[in-house]
Amino acid sequence: MLRSLSLRLTLVLAALFVLLGVVFILILQHFTDMYREEVNQRMNADLAMVIARENRTIDKGAIDLPRLTALLPYVMKVNPAAEVYVLDATGRVLAFSGPTTPVRTTVDLAPVRAFLSMTQPLPILGTDPRAAAARRIFSAAALGDAARPAGYVYAVLGSDSAPASALSHGAVLPLAAAALAASLLFALGTGLVLFRALTGRLRRLADSVERFRHSPTSAPMPEAVPAVAAQRGDEIARLDAAFSALARQIAEQLRALERTDRDRRTALAHASHDLRTPLAALQGYLQTLSLKGASLDEAQRRHYLGVALKHSERLGRLIDQVFALAKLDDPDARPQREPFSLGELAGDIVEKHRLRAESGGVALRADIAADAPPVYADIAMFERLIENLLDNALKFTPPGGRIHVALRRAAGGVELAIEDTGCGIDAADLPQIFERFYRGPAAPGASSGLGLAIVRRVAELHGVPIDVESSPATGTRFVLQVPAGRTVSTAGELSAPA
């Protein structure tokens, strides 16, 4: 039960109420005592003056001690709580009204003079002759000349038999205790209600965290908190927004890892199958040549060797594609950027494949704009990208078709387009063409299914978008918008393009 945050906050609030109540009672008791003493001293301020003004208290400039001593019993009858002392000019006790002898024979006159001159606010505490260290309120009056008094009448107000505090025998202390108990009950009740309401969002957030901990990908995701609401909200709102964003990010990363692991297993299965097929064919033809080489004529041997060479080349291309994609998938893979002419690179690759296109009856044409600016990228990666796109076009373009490679200046860079009049891609298959080992219905058996995956990875590493337009029996068009690169100054330093 004490694990509940709302209950612990309520108990803390109740403890604070108790502490504040105790401090309040102590302060109330102190100020009540001060108020009682001030009222008592103010009401009895003239007591000593009345005694001092009695006839013949001063006789021939000296204190009439017998006269004053005779008056003291009457004072005790009128005000039993007061004790009267007759002091000389130095504060020595000459007479007193009590039944027992005081323990102190002198009185400090500094408070007496402050009382007579009223230079301090009441209450003013003075010496209590019957206590060694106690100080009490009093009334005082000068005997004789006020400027040069012969002595003083000193009346201590509130003897030892008087109550020490009005709270101890009155109704204030019980009322204060009752108020404290009521405040404590109020704090407990309101604290349980308010803190439970205030911590409701924390409980929901804790439940979301717990569900996410047990099932990070399948648990219901917390609702996204708008950024404006999070900024304007309190700490809980910001925490909720941060957890919501973090949970979604972690869940997406976990799902991406699951997809990557699934793709890895699929890729291994496809790679094993694709490697096994040409390898088995290569072994079969070589075994045939090894076992029946003497009985085969020259044409048969050349045919078998040609087929074996074809499968070995296919095997080599597949291995090269697998290693190229694995290298590009490395988290540390970074393009080695340098400024170069993308038009010259595309033109060289077109010339490289022209003979293959002509042998297949395909018209290959390049249209390179002379004013195309240079790009700043990894030249080897872009060479593979264009090679794969052009190889893909040659595979899917039948004899009599056309392939057009165009590069022109575009806003902020260059536009590279490779368009063919091949079989095209169905709309349902278009979103999958960049997946690894994906082969469409019209893909030839020689396709590895990795060419376009490599194209997409190179584009991703360079931050270059790829647009694909295709329709069945019409052809396919790949378009890349490559930002303009940097130019090389005469000093050999790279600078941003104009």
Image (spheres, grey):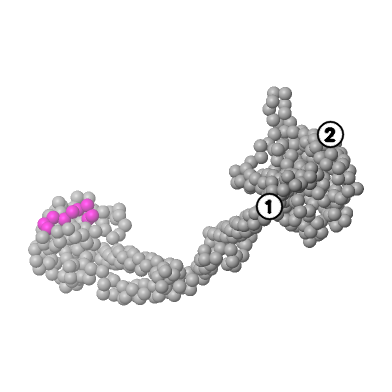
Identify the residue at the far front of this view: 295
Q: Is residue 236 above or below residue 344?
A: below
Mark 2–mark 1 Cα distance, whole angstroms, equals: 51 Å
Whether residue 201 appears in this view of the structure is no
Determine the residue positioned at 21% across, 65% down.
Answer: 157
Residue wearing tag 2: 371
Local packing at callout 1 (Cα closer than 10 Å; few below 14, some 14-19, many 20+) is: few
Q: Secondary structure at mark 1?
A: helix
Sequence order check, earlier mark of 2 and 1: 1
Out of 213 and 467, give the one closest to the viewer: 467
Out of 261 and 11, give the one closest to the viewer: 261
Q: Position of residue 300 (x, y in %)?
A: 79, 46
Q: Position of residue 186 (x, y in %)?
A: 43, 74
Out of 476 and 498, give the one closest to the viewer: 476
Residue 107 drawn in magenta: yes
Residue wearing tag 1: 280
Determine the residue positioned at 44% across, 75% down.
Answer: 189
Going by the numbered disc 2, the residue's amino acid type is Asp
